[in-house]
Amino acid sequence: MPRFPIFRLGKEPDKLALPEMIAAAPLIALDGLAVGVDNLRHDVALSPRFVEAARSHVMRLIVHHGELEGLLAAEGAQKTQGPSWMRNAASSTRNPADKSDWKALLAELHLAALNRAKKEENISVDLLARLAVTKFLRTEMNQQFAQVLERCRVLLKNYEGIRQGKAVEYRERVAAFQVRKKIILRKTGQDLFETLREIEKESLARMRRSLFGEAKTGEARTGEARVEEKTGEPGSTGLASYGLFLNRLAFSDDGRDDYLCAEHYVMLGNWDRDPDRYPALKDIVWGFIRSLFSEDTTAETIDAWVCAPQNARALVGTGTPDDSSAEGAAQQERLAKWVRLLEDEQVMECVIASYHAVPLLSEYAPRINPQQLKNALISRPECDRVERMIQEHGKLSPNSLYAAVGKVAGCRGTERAKVAARFLQDFSHYHRDLRRLETLNASLDSVNLVSTEKLRELSRMNGTLYEFLLPEEQQPEEERVLRHVVLKADVRDSTRLTRTLMERGLNPASYFSLNFYDPVNKLLGKYGAQKVFLEGDAIILAILERSGEPELAVSRACVLAREIIEIVRGYNELMQRSGMPGLELGVGITLQEAAPLYLMDGEHQIMISEALNDSDRLSSCNKRARKEMEPQAGPFHVFVFQAAGADPTKDEAENPDDVLSYNLGGIRMNEAAFRKLEQEVSLVPLAVKLPPAIASSDKGEYRLFSATVPVDRDIFRKIVVRQSRVPRINVEDFSVQGWTDRTYYEVCTDPAIYAALEKKKAAGR
């Protein structure tokens, strides 16, 4: 993405400084992707199931907006006639896939593309999938319109020679369908856009931020995932390109649709004699900005400024600036200059009329052209002409037209200023989306939707085919386990707890089962975990990461461990109210970059893995460390100390007697798991102001990181990870003698830390 400077001009004589201008430039860069067999474009094949569902859905939308449901129902008696494609099309119209099914398939395909992009560590893979889907849907809109029209023509052949009844009605409806082609395609495109925006809000934006991070995306935290392409930072271009797909003009031919502009932007002139045509207004806006900054300001710079709509608000406000402040007074002065410029260019009346014409469209259009309606509000001859057209349609009344004419004529003073300020922002929005459409159209030319099996196989053989399939369609790779994560949840003082329960005449087996084993068992399917085995005082679980699957084993193990801690904490609160003892846990998470080995005990597999021993060590809690740390641990629940005088060349596993670990209600992971977590999700350094009890509990410097982990398509969980140095201590009094170069890692479990995170998040909104 090109870098645009952010300008802040100094004060001119007797003038306040101009506001800081944000620069934005739409761009899609498909870096690191192979070109296809034609050496020009990227070969793409989309899921066959998705393609079939999309065609059915687009046809259903066209039939619906073309008001042909009743007419095409007449095909039922003739379903055995005509070519096979027509019989299949008739069947899909009568029994269309439910919108929710189509939406689910669309979301599933995009999520599969995101996971593939994460696996290949290249966001361009997902951008290519988005381009391919957009190109396919745009192509299908025209093809399905042609197919529906052909179906209608075949149907009309059965009524040739008949001049009355259904025959006349059907001919009129088919003729209206042809005339309304542009309107039907616009409504179909807007339905597709709304569905794409919904899945972006519900899952795609959060999944993308989870997998690729948020700091460099430039994405706003809104449902629309609005992008300001201004960062220009390395690696941010791909992530900042998603705003091009969340564009209402994306499914229009050239972005010059009167209805679309009237509803979502501002309806500009389209006829040669109109003074408010887009090129003319663009020159006016460019001239206004140059008059404020400098006549030497380049067109490229102004274009980048206008592509950021918030600049318009910064320049002229909302039309009612507060002149009691310096900024408000400056905005008022610039707004007055903008109004004068529009009036001098004789476009102010057109701008006012464009807004007052919008309510008239639902009543008079398409019988009357939207441009005629707008011009009728400011031109007496045009108003007379439109009035006659209304009277020719006996069912219409001109009252709404007269009311709108009065409103335009009565727009004076502050009301004109409000309209002018709104217009500058609406024009900026329109210009930005028009530039995004131009960029999108250029990028679509680089995508080759492979349509024949021969070309698909040729591209596949050459390693240049990008296939975006639904999970169930993907060719199963050899089920090879690449790595595995072991999670051990160890119950503290289980012997003492069992004895206490038995002394009270209670059943320890049912206690452990109801409060620990059964709740954990219910979580296994959710996280793709499997039970390795149960011990009397522990559960050992494993998550296997196979080739071809999303690489999220460590992050999901972290969320699973946190949920286990939360469940036990909840049951403990209930037990304490009943006067019963609670469970105390320590959890260890270990990653091993290899598949586990297995022994066979009859039909039962027994896992052999170094990760089992490591997870046992990480989940343990030294009694001396517990005695020292429990009174002061605070919301941190994991600490590691090295005895002074211990051999610094030996790690914790080699010299366990010289390392004292504290883990009470905490989750500790090994360094390999932390490094893998950095690859799986975006770890964002977290600077939060923690309560004093938290800050004082750590005996050394620490760093916090936050991440959002995708558990399922619509389920995301937050985790906070603490990285801390291992101190060298005097084991007699635990006084710090110095610091080692070693670190340890805790997945934070205390609610106070997550409350601080939410407070910071809320403050930043």
Image: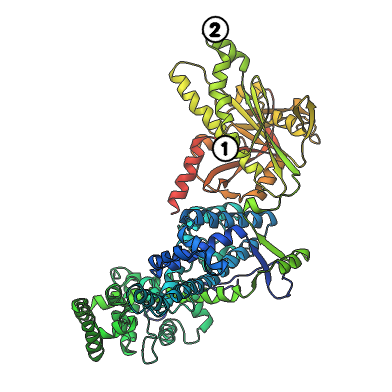
> Where in the figure is residue 296, as x and y percent of width and height?
50, 86
Q: Quick one: which residue is furthest to the front in this view?
A: 161
Q: Quadrant of residue 454?
A: bottom right
Along the viewing direction, whichever of 325 and 242 lies nearer the viewer = 242
Instruction: Locate residue 643 relative to residue 190 in the image: left or right.
Output: right
| In the rendered image, the vertical position of residue 217 relative to residue 177, given as above or below | above
Q: Nearer the viewer, residue 157 or 710?
A: 157
| Mark 2 surroundings within 10 Å by alpha-carbon count, few (fewer than 14), some (14 through 19), many (20 or more) | few
Q: Position of residue 103 (x, y in %)?
A: 50, 56
Query: Answer yes or no: do the residues labelled 1 and 2 have beta carbons within 8 Å?
Result: no
Write down the quadrant of residue 167 in the picture.
Answer: bottom left
For this view, does 207 lie left or right of residue 93?
Answer: right
Residue 156 point in image, percent of width and height: 43, 75
Residue that badge 1 annotates? 748
Q: Amino acid at mark 1?
A: Cys
531 or 234, which lies in front? 531
**In what element is the residue under mark 1?**
loop
Q: Identify the secondary structure beneath mark 2.
A: helix
Residue at the spot of label 2: 503
Q: CA distance from mark 1 to mark 2?
A: 35 Å
- The residue under the point 71% across, 45% down is 546
Picture coordinates of residue 384 (x, y %)?
A: 22, 88
